[in-house]
Image (spheres, rainbow, N blue to C red):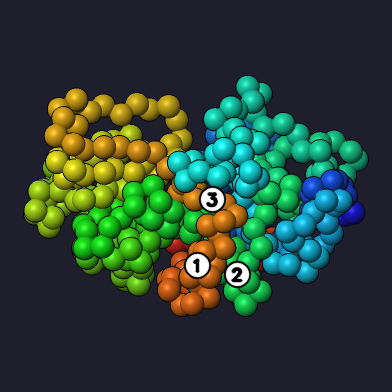
Amino acid sequence: MKSRAAIAYEAGKPLVVEPIEVGAPGAGQVLIENRAAGLCHTDLSLIDSGYRGFPIIVGHEGVGVVLQCGPGVTSVKPGDHVVTSSIPECGTCPRCVSRRSNLCVKEDVTKFHPDGSPPSPHLRRLGGSPVRVLCQGATFSNHAVADEDLVAPIPAEIPLHVASVLSCAVITGMGAALFSADVQQGSTVVVFGLGGVGLNVLDGARLAGATRIIGVDTNPSKVEVARRFGLTDFIDARRGGSEILAAVQAMTAGGADYSFECVGDSKVAELAVEASHPNWGKTVLVGSPSGPEPMHLPIRSFMLGRSVVGSLLGDAKPRTDMARIAQWYVEGKLATDHLISHRLPFAAINDGFDLMRRGESIRAIVEY
């Protein structure tokens, strides 16, 4: 069938919206009509760096409607509203049945192809030439084919524009607070970076019952929306590392119980560790780094009991936990309605990324 997609052809250049051909779903797969897609900083990093290869469709956060199911599909049916994940959940492998990991054995995301992402077997440019995708859901394409274990059904009453941010920003941030950190009631939290993911860390910490939730960002204009997600205190990151550290320590009697790095910067990560309590503080690294920069911390920073963990997709099960998060939204427990700052037509997708580059959006989405 014919569709259209926003394709990156060259590092740092605007995406090109053009017609593509979409194949039929095979066994265990579904054909999805994507309705809306969130613009994530990870997409921008891949567009600007090109390290996953070109041409590529990088969208990975979005919502759609199932049009067709291949043989053997049992968990969704045509007409279902679904969000697609960047990692699968088969539900039966040792990792899927354990709370210790959300990295299904079907797709080890730690193994990257040396020549970038492989071409998609289902999406091709007109004329037959293949195109790469970041993940099967390919949310910057109006239609895509994905394995059943990469899609999660959601209640139809969730507005599609809201549902478009559930599968990355919301589940990553909420999961980091609830699953990676296991934030406890009455605790103190500091979050470095109040973008789409950082705001959802706030929301998860609020839901968990944290009593003091501190946000650190270079943009004070984010304070108003951040308070809707649970922010109690704000520190302007332009003050410098030593002043930020002193402010956090003063607010938390020596250091936060939980510290979250949501920027993807090694220097910010080092500061996040030092901002955690030296006896029991836990730092969660959530932000996706754009390069191989190492962290430099003295061993003594950990001798009294600090710990650091990484978090991919918030350690959330992309299908099981998505059902829980979607239900929390339906019950009015989440602040997700306030996350989307810009709703753009699909043809204006490059405008959305320009807003991101200028720091003028919280989460921009495009709608088909």
Near mark 3 (Cα within 10 A), the count class, few <14, some 14-19 or many ≥20, is many
Question: Tag 3's secondary structure?
Answer: loop
Q: CA distance from mark 3 to mark 1?
A: 24 Å
Q: Is residue 154 above or below residue 139?
A: below
Task: Please provide percent x and percent y for residue 133.
Answer: 69, 41
The image quadrant that residue 130 belongs to is: top right
Q: For the residue marked with disc 2, what is the amino acid?
A: His
Q: CA distance from mark 3 to mark 2?
A: 22 Å
At horizontal 28% and vertical 66% (from top left) the residue drawn is 209
Quadrant into which the C terminus falls = bottom right
In terms of depth relative to the viewer, which is nearer, 349 or 132?
Answer: 132
Q: For the residue marked with disc 1, what is the amino acid?
A: Ile
Task: Please provide percent x and percent y for residue 63.
Answer: 65, 62
The mark total stands at: 3
Q: Earlier in the sequence, mark 3 or mark 1?
A: 3
Question: Tag 2's secondary structure?
Answer: helix
CB of mark 2 within 8 Å of CB of mark 1?
yes
Q: CA distance from mark 2 to mark 1?
A: 8 Å
- Label 1 sits on residue: 340
In terms of depth relative to the viewer, which is nearer, 133 or 68?
Answer: 68
At horizontal 45% and vertical 41% (from top left) the residue drawn is 100
The image quadrant that residue 131 belongs to is: top right
Q: Earlier in the sequence, mark 3 or mark 2?
A: 2
Near mark 2 (Cα within 10 A), the count class, few <14, some 14-19 or many ≥20, is many
Number of the front mark, 3 or 1: 3
Quadrant into which the N terminus falls = bottom right
What number is the disc on residue 161? 2
Locate residue 293 relative to residue 366 in the image: left or right: left
CB of mark 3 within 8 Å of CB of mark 2?
no
- Label 3 sits on residue: 317
Number of the front mark, 3 or 2: 3
